[in-house]
Amino acid sequence: MKITALGTNGWFDSQTGSTNCTLIQTDDFSIVLDAGYGIAKIKNRVDFSKPVYIFLTHLHLDHIIGLHVLDWFTFDQPLRIIAPAGGLEDLKDFMRRPFTTNWDQHPYAVELIDADDLSEQGFPFEVSALPLVHAVPDTGYRFVIEGKVVAFVLDTAFCDNAVKLAQNADFLITESGFLPEQGNPKTGHMDPAGAARLAREAGAKQVLLIHFGANVYDSIEKRSQAVETGRDIYPDLIMGVDQMEFIL
């Protein structure tokens, strides 16, 4: 299994990277986690003859704006897009004219699924979902793929469900939306120390930080300096940058 960080910025694209998108690839399928403009980079990476699944945490634009480029791809099998729990109708309202192509009028089949209905889908992997703490309804995911646990816990304050999703994960992908000591439960974002605390309490084995708020992290150097402040709590925090790859 290969995991690639395609978009590591929060809020907007900048010289430091594209907005949120992470790709998981196996020999049999691909999973796209959030659909910021980083999703455009799957063009030359994904085998479109195999199943592709897109899981969305929430409907802020930096997590779904890349759905506007779906017509650029050709999916040979039905594309399955998982909306955050309870967000299916809102997602349909976004994926329509005049904003973009209607979700059911792409040149290939598209199926929209609510994260509340994951157990009924017969995916070729295990996946569970829990609500997280954010300014809007937000869903985190826990996958079991080829015997490995991958947790995707984005745009959230530190909370019990984040720890549950990340428990003993082989690979945790989480966020550092704020600068050190700026984490704020009301807006639902962590700073590096909050992410490190989550990693430590969950016992995660590898931890990748993405969703660096582009407004405050305006250079990769600022990312590096900030991530270093979390390493007193969890020494092996990985600072995400676009195009970074991992093999599990």
Image (cartoon, rainbow, N blue to C red):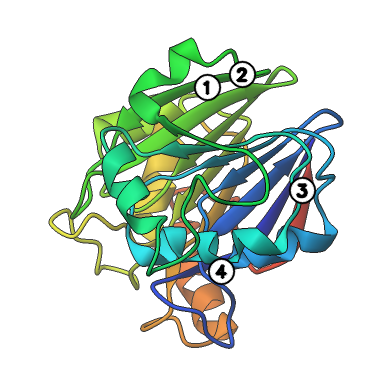
Callouts 1 and 2 close, C-beta under 8 Å: yes
Q: Earlier in the sequence, mark 3 or mark 2?
A: 2
Residue depicted at x 67% and y 66%: 40
**Residue 223 location (% of width, % of height):** 51, 75
Query: Mark 1 and mark 2: span between their CA atoms?
Result: 8 Å
Label 3 or label 4, whichever lies nearer to me, is: 4
**Residue 244 location (% of width, % of height):** 73, 61
Q: Which mark is residue 246?
A: 3
Q: Secondary structure at mark 4?
A: helix
The residue wearing badge 4 is: 37
Query: Mark 1 and mark 3: span between their CA atoms?
Result: 20 Å
Q: Which mark is residue 127?
A: 1
* Relative to 244, residue 46 above or below: above
Q: Secondary structure at mark 1?
A: strand
The residue wearing badge 2 is: 123
Q: Secondary structure at mark 2?
A: loop
**Which amino acid, by three-letter code, is at mark 3?**
Phe
Query: Mark 1 and mark 4: span between their CA atoms?
Result: 24 Å
The crowd level at tag 4 (other Cα within 10 Å; few <14, some 14-19, many 20+) is many
Residue depicted at x 18% and y 55%: 135
